Amino acid sequence: MQVRADESVEHALLSCPQYSAARVSLFRDLQQLGFPQQSVTTSFILGRIIVAAGSPPDLRRQALEVTSSFLASINDLRSSPL
C-alpha cells in the first residue's frame, strides 16, 4: 500500500478510502455502545473519550477497546506489502 507523505492523521482516521471498511466497523461498534457517529473525532479515536455522568462504569474502557482495534487495523493495512 502506498501512503502519501503528506497524509494527515485526521485524513487517515476519518476519511481515507483505504480504511473505509475498518471505519464502518468502528462507527457500528461505537454506535452499539451509544456513541453517535458525529461524536467520533480524531481526538476521540486517539483516546479522549468523555462519557456522561451515570454511564455504565466500563463504557469508556469498551470504547477504548473499539478504537484501539480500529487503530490496529489501520496499522496492519499500512504495514502490509502491496
Image (cartoon, grey):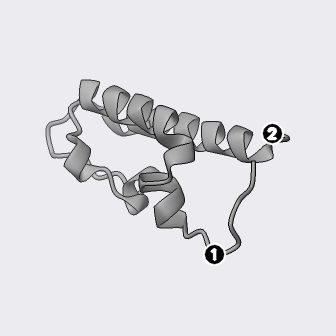
Instruction: Give the residue at the far right of this rendering.
Output: 81
Q: Position of residue 52 (x, y in %)?
A: 17, 46
The image quarter containing residue 15 is bottom left
Horizontal relation, residue 1 to residue 11: left or right? right
Identify the residue under disc 1. 6
Tell me the number on the disc at residue 24.
Answer: none
| Residue 47 seen by the camera | no
Q: Amino acid at mark 2?
A: Ser
Q: Earlier in the sequence, mark 1 or mark 2?
A: 1
* Residue at image point 19% right, 35% down: 55
Instruction: Give the residue at the far bottom of this rendering.
Output: 6
Asked which secondary structure carries label 2, the reply is loop
Identify the residue under disc 2. 80
Q: Position of residue 60 (x, y in %)?
A: 36, 40
Mark 1 neighbour density, 10 Å: few (under 14) some (14–19) many (20 or more) = few
Q: Position of residue 66 (x, y in %)?
A: 46, 33
* Residue at image point 62% right, 36% down: 73
Q: Nearer the viewer, residue 42 or 82?
A: 82
User: Mark 1 to mark 2: distance in Å?
Assistant: 19 Å
